């Protein structure tokens, strides 16, 4: 008779589906924007301002959702995030002007932020330290899958349909994901009478002495901000955001600048996506076997090497392919590691808070890096300078996270006074 699978795998399935929501907005809108501009008569500048509503809402709400997940549980915040994402998609599908479209993007940003925060606090409770990075790596592939599939499906749909069809279809799809998670999502193993999958004896002992209930309190943010490790982790993630987003924003333009055709540039971007999908799985497994801070640094270093190869590649196909593979593989690592490393340095009652603050740093970096890269490109006359910015950021992040002290033993939250 086969043994019943641990419920952690059901949680992992629900988390994977929910994390698709991040990809449904962040990696689909670039395909829809040109049609929206044409249909609604919007300029590139106005459309850029509208899209920025998503990113600024996402930045602020990552902090808020992180705190709320520690206070009220990840199940509630995930379900609310899915509801808001679906509502945002519906608003965008019926939008007829700037205001309604901006509201739709804003609401979508609020919802997507909750889904981005979800894996770290949820899976850190359901999986032991030796399984956590693998689980988070699997979940993050959901957004990458959306990226790859959208490249084939969305342009085809837009050929014979208005852009509204995309947003309406995504809204309904998110509601289906919401229904699935409503029935299966649970905050912690204790609610099912279970222990975390793959937890060590030390972790189980810590859970036994931790007081029951939710131990988050008003001092949670201060506890995180007083910890020096937070600034090294968040700082590394910030410069990663500068490097990753800054390079990715101008990559197609850079390829055209050095002589690649639009079709060839698209193929290179697709190769980047496939490498990122594989990387998320690989780094998750590696992170469960090696020190997560070193894996974090190693992936940033690989990202930097990939950028350097792209700078030197020119129109040499072999070097360009190698550079994109290294950039994709390395760039997927910090996303997995930033989630997995939280439980190594912060107690379980503040994982959502600490991750929310770290994730906000990445969002801010994503907002400012295209500006910095653009200014550098304008002043030097070449987009190569934006790539060099990414190279420097990757090196700084790799050094900073590698200097992080060894994590303390898993801390138990003291019992009620």
Image (cartoon, rainbow, N blue to C red):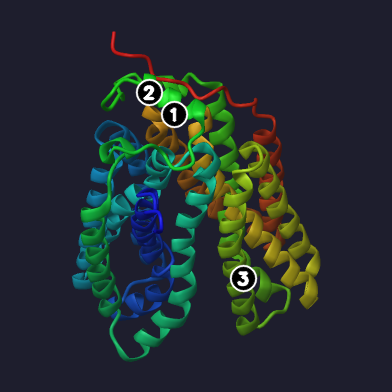
Is residue 374 shown to the viewer in this render? no
* x and y percentages locating residue 198 in the rendered image: 49, 41
Is residue 121 shown to the viewer in this render? yes
* Distance Cα–Cα, label 2 vs label 1: 6 Å
Q: Are marks 2 and 1 in contact (CB under 8 Å)?
A: yes
Nearer the observer, disc 2 or disc 3? 2
> Tag on residue 204?
1
* x and y percentages locating residue 248 in the rendered image: 58, 61
Residue found at x 50% / y 43%: 132
* Distance Cα–Cα, label 3 vs label 1: 52 Å
Q: Is residue 49 above or below residue 77?
A: below
Left/right placement of residue 275 relative to residue 74 reads: right
Q: Quadrant of the C terminus?
A: top left
Q: Earlier in the sequence, mark 3 or mark 1?
A: 1
Determine whether the residue tagged by mark 3 lies in a helix, strand or loop.
helix
Determine whether the residue tagged by mark 2 lies in a helix, strand or loop.
helix
Residue at the extreme bottom of the image, as rendered: 160
Q: How many marks?
A: 3
* Distance Cα–Cα, label 2 vs label 3: 55 Å
> Tag on residue 208?
2
Residues packed near mark 2 inside 10 Å, few (<14), some (14 to 19) or many (20 plus) = few
Residue found at x 44% / y 62%: 142
Nearer the observer, disc 3 or disc 1? 1
Q: Earlier in the sequence, mark 2 or mark 3?
A: 2
Q: Is residue 47 above or below residue 79?
A: below
Q: Is residue 321 above or below residue 398?
A: below
Q: Circle 3 sits on which residue? A: 253
Asked whether 338 or 365 is in front, the reply is 338
* x and y percentages locating residue 258 in the rendered image: 73, 74
Residues packed near mark 3 inside 10 Å, few (<14), some (14 to 19) or many (20 plus) = some
Residue at the extreme front of the image, as rendered: 1
């Amino acid at each position: 008779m086969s043994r019943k699978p641990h419920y952690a795998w059901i949680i992992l399935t629900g988390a994977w589906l929910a994390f698709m929501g991040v990809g449904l907005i962040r990696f689909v809108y670039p395909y829809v924007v040109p049609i929206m501009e044409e249909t609604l008569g919007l300029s590139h500048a106005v459309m850029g301002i509208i899209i920025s509503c998503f990113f600024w809402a996402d930045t602020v709400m990552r902090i808020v959702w992180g705190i709320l997940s520690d206070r009220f549980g990840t199940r509630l915040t995930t379900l609310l995030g899915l509801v808001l994402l679906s509502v945002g998609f519906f608003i965008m599908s019926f939008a007829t002007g700037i205001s309604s479209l901006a509201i739709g993007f804003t609401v979508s940003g609020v919802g997507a932020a909750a889904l981005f925060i979800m894996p770290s606090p949820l899976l850190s409770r359901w999986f032991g330290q030796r399984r956590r990075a693998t689980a988070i790596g699997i979940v993050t592939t959901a957004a990458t899958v959306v990226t790859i599939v959208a490249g084939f499906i969305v342009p085809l749909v837009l050929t014979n349909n208005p852009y509204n069809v995309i947003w309406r279809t995504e809204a309904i799809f998110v509601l289906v994901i919401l229904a699935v998670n409503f029935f299966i999502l649970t905050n912690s193993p204790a609610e099912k009478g279970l222990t975390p999958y793959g937890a060590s004896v030390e972790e189980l002992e810590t859970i036994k002495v931790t007081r029951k209930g939710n131990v988050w309190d008003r001092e949670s943010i201060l506890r995180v901000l007083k910890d020096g490790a937070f600034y090294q982790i968040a700082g590394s993630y910030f410069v990663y955001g500068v490097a990753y987003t800054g390079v990715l924003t101008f990559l197609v333009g850079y390829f055209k600048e050095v002589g690649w055709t639009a079709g060839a540039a698209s193929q290179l971007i697709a190769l980047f996506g496939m490498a990122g999908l594989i990387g998320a799985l690989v780094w998750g497994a590696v992170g469960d076997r090696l020190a997560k801070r070193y894996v974090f640094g190693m992936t940033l270093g690989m990202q930097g090497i990939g950028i350097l190869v792209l700078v030197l590649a020119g129109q040499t196909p072999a070097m360009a392919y190698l550079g994109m593979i290294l950039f994709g593989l390395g760039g997927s690592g910090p996303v997995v590691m930033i989630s997995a490393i939280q439980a190594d340095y912060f107690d379980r009652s503040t994982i959502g808070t600490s991750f929310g603050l770290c994730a906000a740093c990445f969002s801010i970096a994503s907002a400012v890096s295209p500006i910095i890269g653009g200014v550098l490109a304008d002043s030097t006359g070449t987009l190569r300078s934006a790539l060099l910015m990414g190279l420097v950021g990757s090196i700084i992040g790799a050094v900073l996270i590698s200097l992080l002290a060894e994590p303390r033993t898993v801390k138990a939250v003291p019992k009620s006074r």
